[in-house]
Image (tube, helix red, strand yellow):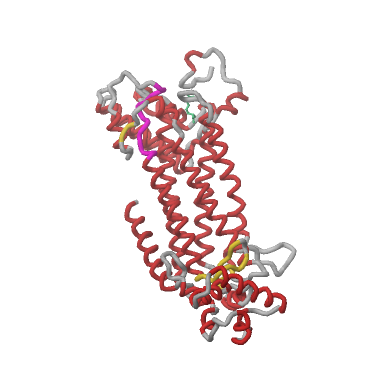
Amino acid sequence: MKDKPWSGRFNQDTDVVVEAFTESVSFDSRLYREDIQGSIAHAHMLCAAGILTAAEAEAITEGLVGIGEEIENGSFSFDPALEDVHMNIEVELTRRIGEAGRKLHTARSRNDQVATDFKLYVREELCRTEESLRRLMTSLIEKAREHVDTIIPGMTHLQHAQPVSLAHHLLAYVEMFLRDHSRIVDTKKRLNTSPLGSAALAGTPHPIDREMTAAELGFDGPSRNSMDAVSDRDFALEAVFDAATIMMHLSRMAEEIILWNSSPFSFVELSDAYCTGSSIMPQKKNPDVAELVRGKVGSVYGNLVALLTMMKGLPLAYNRDMQEDKIPVMETLDTVRQCLEVMAGLIAGLRVNQEAVRESLNRGFITATDVADFLVDKGVSFREAHRITGELISSLIGQGRTLGELTLDEFRSYAKEFDEGIFTVIRPENSVDRRTSFGGTARKNVRQELNHAQERLAGLENTD
Ligand code: ARG
């Protein structure tokens, strides 16, 4: 019979098909750092509690550090027959240091062990995601600084609506990513209790010190209910939800870049380093990076639903179903970080085609609201002003002309309140600069907001 840490009550080897079906080491080996860190903290505590001698604790620690180094440099080989990362490391430790290794699992179960390892892993990955978010926001703010004076058509329903500063548009994304960042900070706060010492589900009779392991592992304290601690995966779900929201924001941005880069728009040019070509059409330079970001959202949403469904209806406490949490979480956190990183680079290399942007402002009667507002300033009711402007535009559409081509007499044929001032009002930059309401796109506002965004970003870096 093969020797497994749990094989005592078994009289038959595990079927090979079952071994392959139940193993998780092929993916949870990524938790080796956290597993070793958790085990070292546990050994320190067992020693302080008098359960291990100082020599045993030291042998365990040294053995684990050695195993960690071998895993790191690729010379360690994981055995799927030993199921998961936890048993692989424990068995190897015992092989190396003997009996002391067999004492490490005192007052602990794989149930609290895996919950602890996974929390440490998710916490670290979330910190890295925060960093990537900050890099993307830095990129967006820098690009926004270059483009306060670039006026683009703001859209609703993907139609010309009102002119806005491109910086204002980019800062809208900074707001989204700042919210994403704060969501991660919140997730980390709720995550930060230590399951270690909850054992299988009911706690342990051994005189352990859960405060001590919690402190060594950087948790705020031990979890308060052993059954909840071993069966809670809210932290994983929240992390994936946070990632899904980031992906949603990224894909909106990706979509706009694809659109702006499209032949009919030609608002932007992407750097060659961030595009790929076509194998048949030599003229092509495709925005594949943005398209892939948009495309990868699907698997992240899928992972969120997979996790929610996996947890649904699970009776307390641990059930093996929960082993299925690893791949969706790991895959999601890898994907979101990769997407954040490439988008930061894509934004940095973005060049604006000023001519195309300016040209597009002539279309779509983008300052029609300003024409109506002009009449309002002259005492006309907004509804009446809206009607007059609507009629004026309708006739321009019929004639194939733009607002800028109207003479004063023509304006006045629609309303006597029009005067020379109307020509200033319909200039896009004036339209932008009049929108000085708090949060509006006036360039004066946008300059202030740029500094404010920069300060908020710097504030985040200091809290991490
Ligand atoms: N590999 C398992 C997981 O990831 C570890 C916990 C196993 N516990 C158990 N009672 N079989 O969930």
Q: Residue at x 32, y 52 (%)?
A: 463
Q: Is residue 207 above or below residue 386?
A: above
Q: Residue furthest right?
A: 280
The residues colored magenta run 190-201
State whether residue 327 appears in this view.
yes
Q: Residue at x 60, y 54 (%)?
A: 294
What number of labels is visible? 0
Q: Position of residue 426 (x, y in %)?
A: 55, 79
- Is 296 on the left or on the right of 196, as rendered? right
Q: Position of residue 277 (x, y in %)?
A: 67, 64
Q: Position of residue 24 (x, y in %)?
A: 53, 32
Question: Which one is nearer the viewer's eye here, 408 or 303?
Answer: 408
Quadrant in the picture for the N terminus = top right
Magenta stretch, main secondary structure, is loop
Q: Image quadrant of residue 394? A: bottom right
Question: Which one is nearer the viewer's eye here, 176 or 103?
Answer: 176
Question: Which one is nearer the viewer's eye here, 400 or 164?
Answer: 400
Inspect the magenta stretch and tell me whether residue 194 lies in it: yes
Q: Image quadrant of residue 356? A: bottom right
Q: Residue at x 38, y 37 (%)?
A: 66
- Is 448 on the left or on the right of 13, as rendered? left
Q: Position of residue 286 (x, y in %)?
A: 65, 63
State whether residue 351 appears in this view.
no
Inspect the magenta stretch and tell me whether residue 318 lies in it: no
Q: Is residue 450 above or below residue 374?
A: above
